[in-house]
Image (tube, rainbow, N blue to C red):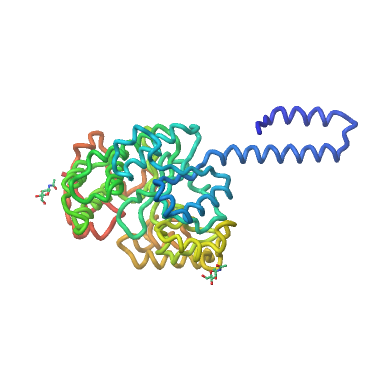
Amino acid sequence: MPFAPSSFLFQMCLLARRPRVSAMKFLALLILHLGVLISASKLRTQSNVGIVVVGDPSFQRRFDAQIRSLRCYANRHGYEMHLLTASEYAECKRFKDFFFRKHCTVSKFLETQAPSFTAAVFDGDVVVAAPMRGLDKWINHGADIQLYNRCLFHEIMAGNYMVRNTPFARDFLMRWAKYYDQRPSGFSSADNGAIQLVVMETIQVEGYNTCYSMYRNLTDKVTNLNSYWDYVHCTKEAIGPARAWTLPKGRLTMWPRLEFYVADGVFLNRWASSEIGPIMHHGVKDPQDVVSFYYKDLDQCEINETSVLRSAKELGETALHLAQSYPEYFPAGRGCKQCAETCMESFSCEPLQDSEEPRPRQVVDFRASSFTIVDSAESRRHSWGWSRWSTV
Ligand SMILES: *[C@@H]1O[C@H](CO)[C@@H](O)[C@H](O)[C@H]1NC(C)=O
Ligand SMILES: *[C@@H]1O[C@H](CO)[C@@H](O)[C@H](O)[C@H]1NC(C)=O
């Protein structure tokens, strides 16, 4: 419903000046109008957010229960729900690999939306675990592109991300899809291997040429992942700790582990909280888990609070314990902003600010820039720093 506050004020002034309108009537009208004003403004902000799931029809059948939990969530918070098959746009057909076509599809889909639209893009194997909480923290963060580091893997997560409908974000997604043409002959984990380089070229950090050569040189099959992980480490060393990057044409934010709205739930005992932590769990492949563990009545969108919900304290302790058990993924101690003991228990490990150290160098001619591994065995033990490398 369109509603102009100025005409509202005008009406109220008129009413106020007419002596026959009783104070009660005036008050009733005031409340009515305020209600309309509030719901109109709510409608305006909420219609700008969409839950976007991309999967072909067989995939949509397979993950029907997971997708229904996302639909429940969208309805509850007034978000739009969009199911795409990745066969919508002719321009994307040339990407024969589904995962590359997915990002092309999201880019083209965004072109059909309002400029204020924000998309939360999901894999199908994502279930909503804390449905009462909205995505406001991340929506309000406002970066054009929001990504996160996987929990107990070194990579940036490829499957789930948030994008605003800006040229910067659409271009990012299209460049990602086009890495289809650059895939090496060996295992490179499809879009997941590619996103590492897309981020590097977006933030224009030193070392692109080194990591790109390693990528192009991947010849091993999936049975031998060593060269793939060496490549991933090259990129993570170049990118450095999770950071909110401010770039000339837009903003890209990488969230530290467990700080995005979706995480691999199995590492948190599949628990969630109505106060803190991830809202969705990724990696739920079995629909039975959705209807027997997560939900007591999926048709009614009713979560099984007994099995899923825990207090903020209990979930925080679980996260801290996890972080302490895996020092290769979570920097230990209290000595840094993203250190486990500083922030993990309260899920408040924030991305570094753009200028905050330790910061990789950005170079104009980043495509030609190289660095060499000083100690690859050491660097393989971490995936949040870059100091193990030296520039040539
Ligand atoms: C590519 O791999 C070959 C064989 O493992 C190796 O000799 C060569 O140095 C690698 N090149 C790069 C750029 O890493
Ligand atoms: C909810 O979960 C608990 C514990 O997992 C289980 O015992 C109970 O049967 C579930 N409730 C429903 C209605 O499914």
- Measured as percent of width and height from the top left, residue 257 is found at 38, 56
Q: In the displayed structure, does residue 191 sit left or right of residue 318?
A: left
- Total marks placed: 0
Q: In the displayed structure, does residue 197 sit left or right of residue 130?
A: left
The front one of 191 and 93 is: 93
Q: In the displayed structure, does residue 9 sit left or right of residue 386?
A: right
Q: Which residue is drawn at 28% across and 45% down?
A: 194
Q: Which residue is drawn at 87% across and 33% down?
A: 21
Q: In which quarter of the image is the C terminus?
A: top left
The front one of 212 and 383 is: 212
The front one of 384 and 149 is: 149
Quadrant for residue 222, please give it. Answer: bottom left
Q: Which residue is drawn at 50% across and 62% down?
A: 291
Q: Quadrant of the N terminus?
A: top right
Q: Which residue lies furthest to the right in this view?
A: 20
- Measured as percent of width and height from the top left, residue 123 is found at 40, 50
Residue 212 position (above or below residue 316): above
Quadrant for residue 110, please give it. Answer: top left
